[in-house]
Image (spheres, rainbow, N blue to C red):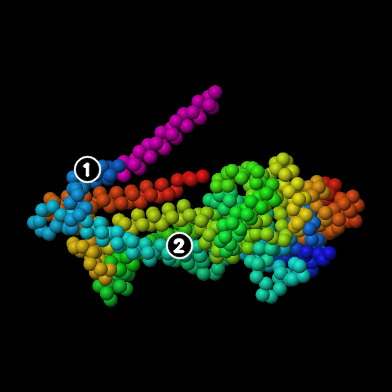
Amino acid sequence: MNHYKFRLVKDRVAFLLVHLSLTLALIPLFSVLYEVVQKGISTITIDFFISPTPTVGEKGGGAANAIQGTLITIGLASLIGIPIGLMSGVFLSEYSEHRLSIIVRFFNDVLSGIPSIIIGVFAYALIVRSIGFSVIAAAFALAIIMIPIVTRTTEEALKLVPMSIREAAIALGVPRWKTVVTIVLRSAKKAVVTGMLLSIARIAGESAPVLVTMGYWRWWFAGLDRPAANLALNVFVFAMSPFESWIALAWGSALVLILLVLGINFAVRIFTRERY
Amino acid sequence: MAPKFEIEDLNAWFGTKHVLKNINMKIEENAVTAIIGPSGCGKTTFIRCLNRMHEITPGARASGKVLFNGLDIYGDGVDPVMIRRKIGMVFQKPNPFPMMSIYDNVAAGLKLNGVKNKKIIDAAVRRSLELANLWDEVKNDLNKSGASLSGGQQQRLCIARALAVEPEVLLMDEPCSALDPIATAKIEALIRKLAENYTVVIVTHNMQQAARVSDYTAFLYLGELMEYGPTKQIFENPKHELTEKYITGKFG
């Protein structure tokens, strides 16, 4: 009986510690959310979604151009980064006996550890110096940030597909590449798409590489070879401005950015819900 | 009647491990041939050599001749993909495609090999499920997930999936080892039925099963073919001492 009581006490203590840690971990998340919602909600008007950045002294204005620019930039980055990441992930998982796979996996891990500002500087040297600050340069930098994330999540997702599923398809006389494309990727679809969406969420809020590749732009989107406005940079620039109304716009942009990332996370949740 | 397979000096390796040694045997058409032997003797490797599934394992290789309808499947210019379409396989653990309905599981082989005509696919799905004695149990649930079936039903679904591409041979790797006795009995009855039109090669750990379902039995031991002949003879009058010891349960 004594043993039993002692175990009961240990159980309670462990339970309490776990919950305490969880609460501690959630405090910063909720305080950030609370602060941003509280300060940002008042700027979220219709004007915010239809008007571009105001000029000095101008009343109102919004972040419509930044939302537009952010969506275009992450869209282009995804178009470059997701296919490369997906295919690299397929290579690492399905052709792991290939000599190159060890090298690719190693450099992919290295790439995922490189600070994003350095990737920005790399894109600056490679693209900005030839065509100037532009959406292309920013999207290129963001795509490089995406690639190791998508590669890794795709590889892990495909490795979870049991070998027996591949063998079943191969034994039906399905060529190997077709087995990968139809059976393996299809079986791991949820996890693969989750990885893609999380990589988009990750780059949506990147500011440093965007700053060095696109710079700050307060107008509407004017072409891929020109800069575009950006939500993360709106926060960066406006938050340090001397005007009340601009600081308010920074909070509004921060809120929209958080909502965007939250929306992507919700999309992941909905997408990964069990159907069967 | 010409044999379906003529195997000449078949050797197989995993890396440096020599798992099959100079196998020579003929497998009769439209009959059930059972491969028995203790664990690790090469039974599974042997049947995986018959449809070139052995080589998909990294480091695995095989040498020798396997004549299928007189054609060496290891010969130059032979496409293993085409061989596998004619020689179907059922695995030890039921492995229906996840995320696919019962219908799509059976149709998978046809669809992935380019068949688009829905009438042909519908007919093949029904015919294969009927042949696998599963149609009556699933005909109203064809859109349900294959994974929602019981283990025995899943295994019959896998058999139907293999049959849908109209192979000539069905290789079965311990198809009942994950199943209960009732499901096993159903699969065994099915194997007998299939033998009317298909050549079946079945690996089994269960000697009673080999005796019940097969026409011919091969006893493998440490990668060598110890004895091969009609099942009745192997079980009632084995020539080799080891065979007798194995089938009477003295080792294994």
State the mark number for residue B218. Answer: none
Specify the quadrant that holds the N terminus of chain B.
bottom right
Residue A238 visible: no
Q: Secondary structure at mark 1?
A: helix
Q: Of the residues under marks 2 and 1, which one precedes in the sequence?
A: 1
Query: Dividing the picture into quarters, in which one does residue A161 lie?
Result: bottom right
Residue bearing the label numbered 1: A38
Q: Give neighbour class at mark 2: few <14, some 14-19, many 20+ (Cα, 10 Å).
A: many
Rendered residue at 20%/48% (across/down): A44
Q: Residue furthest left?
A: A57
Q: Give neighbour class at mark 1: few <14, some 14-19, many 20+ (Cα, 10 Å).
A: few
Q: Main secondary structure of the magenta part?
A: helix
Q: Nearer the viewer, residue A2 or B10?
A: B10
- Using residue B123 as the reference point, say whether residue A263 is left or right of it: left
- Using residue B231 as the reference point, say whether residue A10 is left or right of it: left
Q: Secondary structure at mark 2?
A: helix
What's the chain of the residue with tag 2?
A: A
User: Does the magenta segment cover residue A26?
Assistant: yes
What's the chain of the residue with tag 1?
A: A
Q: Position of residue A229 (x, y in %)?
A: 23, 61
Rendered residue at 27%/74% (across/down): A131
Do residues under tags 2 and 1 come within 8 Å of each other at their CB atoms?
no
Amino acid type at circle 1 is Gln
Q: Which residues are magenta?
A: A1-29
Q: Position of residue A27 (x, y in %)?
A: 31, 41
Above or below residue A3? Residue B180 is below
**Disc 2 to disc 1, C-alpha distance:** 39 Å
Q: Residue furthest top?
A: A1
Q: Nearer the viewer, residue B195 or A51?
A: B195
Above or below residue A258? Residue B9 is below
